[in-house]
Image (tube, helix red, strand yellow):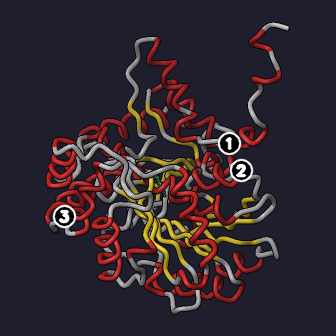
């Protein structure tokens, strides 16, 4: 048998269920680029690709740390001043936690992985939003646990229905995942809804992971941390990171904060065990955490001014194109577009996205990559490029759609 065909080199089964549409679809775009075509990428939420940069003082602190020789490992749960600053900032936003309940991680992604790995045995169930950010299904698939989807309703601002969530709970359900502001929908949850979600967790003894990596990026309403709604009888893990709120995704630095850790002492120790085993998160960016927790207001105001203009162009132009519509997101930098498949000759969301890529070299991600039904015609748009670029893209989309009418 040739070396390359040896059964030793067959990927493990757990990877079969691993999908990440945001990046998987890029291979189609790369193929076009090889033919000399220029693709506009509106598929990935990386602010740096579109001219955003982290706050200068964070860059300075990180560079200084490197220059001063802070190139070793840090404590596995994070530098002391970093976890203290994160806990103090959490407190100021109504989240009850302590420096001992913070773990600095390789981005929010590792925080999610760490919590799920510490909590889930094969067959255990996790309630996840659908559509939802594909990180969670990938981690759950890797652990041979089971993702149980709860629906976000496009007719109701993409909010979940707490009764539906409760109806899907079984004796194996361990975790309820909430993403707020949401990716891919850009929606923000009101306090009554958050309260109901906490109540479900209390009633059915679930742990909540609340992914709040976009909490600073809100347009008209204030973000309310889910953990600030909790009394002392529900365990909540709040996940945050440098990637979006501070526009530094390449630093791979995030953190988790436990609220009511006394309810989950063994799980907390399991988190620490896992954190010890992978040594530490990147050290240099941890030197910027204190500055991040005391960020000047004008940084985020400027970011939001730009994002607001881009949101407005997106929502106005989309809803002017016959057969295309979208929601008006309240947070993050995504909209869920919808192509009317009764009017336009595409069978699925993916067919629409791939045809648009082929003909106009514009890359969106099909909604089914996040869990919507392919026949519903949803697709996610990242509106990070400047308004000039966006206007050109949406005019091309308009031309594309009109030729089919
Ligand atoms: C909801 C959500 N959670 C987590 C992440 C990953 O964050 P990080 O880069 O900090 O790992 C993303 C990235 O797009 C996201 O949208």
Q: Which residue is mark 3?
A: 301
Q: Secondary structure at mark 2?
A: helix
Q: Going from the N terminus, do you reach mark 3 or mark 2 first?
A: 2
**Residue furthest toward the top?**
2
User: What residue sits 22% from the left and 57% below the top?
Assistant: 303
Answer yes or no: do the residues labelled 2 and 1 have beta carbons within 8 Å? yes
Asked if 346 appears above or below 230 in the picture, the reply is above
Q: Is residue 198 above or below residue 241?
A: below
Residue located beneath label 1 in the image? 18
Foreground of the two, 315 or 237: 237
For the image, the number of numbered tags is 3
Quadrant of the image occupied by residue 372? bottom right
In the image, what residue occupies the spot 64% across and 52% down? 139
Q: Is residue 391 visible?
A: no
> Can you identify the residue that label 2 sits on?
141
Q: CA distance from mark 1 to mark 3?
A: 37 Å
Residue 296 placement: quadrant: bottom left
């Amino acid at each position: 048998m040739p070396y390359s065909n040896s059964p030793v080199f067959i990927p493990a089964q757990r990877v079969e269920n691993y999908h990440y549409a945001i990046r998987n679809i890029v291979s189609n775009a790369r193929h076009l680029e090889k033919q000399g075509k220029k693709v506009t990428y509106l598929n990935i939420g990386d602010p740096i690709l579109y001219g955003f940069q982290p706050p200068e003082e964070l860059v300075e602190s990180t560079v200084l740390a490197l220059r001063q020789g802070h190139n070793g490992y840090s404590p596995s749960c994070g530098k002391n001043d970093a976890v203290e600053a994160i806990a103090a900032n959490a407190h100021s936003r109504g989240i009850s936690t302590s420096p001992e309940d913070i773990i600095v991680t390789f981005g929010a992604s590792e925080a999610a992985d760490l919590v799920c790995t510490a909590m889930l045995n094969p067959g255990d169930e996790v309630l996840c939003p659908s559509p939802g950010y594909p990180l969670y299904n990938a981690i759950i698939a890797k652990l041979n646990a089971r993702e149980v989807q709860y629906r976000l309703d496009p007719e109701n601002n993409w909010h979940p229905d707490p009764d539906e969530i409760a109806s899907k709970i079984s004796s194996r359900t361990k975790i309820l995942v909430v993403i707020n502001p949401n990716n891919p929908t850009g929606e923000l949850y009101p306090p009554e809804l958050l309260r109901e979600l906490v109540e479900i967790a209390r009633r059915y003894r679930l742990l909540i992971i609340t992914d709040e990596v976009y909490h600073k990026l809100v347009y008209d309403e204030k973000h309310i941390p889910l953990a600030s709604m909790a009394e002392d009888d529900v365990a909540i893990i709040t996940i945050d990171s440098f990637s979006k709120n501070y526009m530094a995704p390449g630093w791979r630095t995030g953190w988790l904060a436990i609220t009511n850790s006394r309810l989950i002492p063994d799980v907390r120790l399991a988190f620490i065990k896992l954190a010890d085993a992978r040594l530490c998160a990147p050290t240099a960016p941890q030197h910027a955490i204190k500055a991040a927790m005391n960020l000047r207001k004008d940084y985020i105001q400027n970011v939001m001014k730009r994002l607001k203009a881009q949101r407005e162009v997106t929502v106005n132009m989309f809803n002017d194109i016959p057969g295309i519509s979208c929601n008006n997101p309240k947070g993050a930098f995504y909209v869920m577009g919808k192509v009317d498949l009764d009017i336009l000759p595409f069978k699925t969301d993916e067919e629409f996205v791939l045809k648009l890529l082929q003909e106009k070299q514009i890359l969106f991600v099909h909604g089914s990559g996040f869990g919507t039904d392919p026949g519903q015609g949803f697709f996610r748009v990242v509106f990070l490029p400047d308004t000039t670029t966006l206007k050109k893209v949406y005019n091309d989309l308009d031309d594309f759609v009109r030729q089919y009418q």
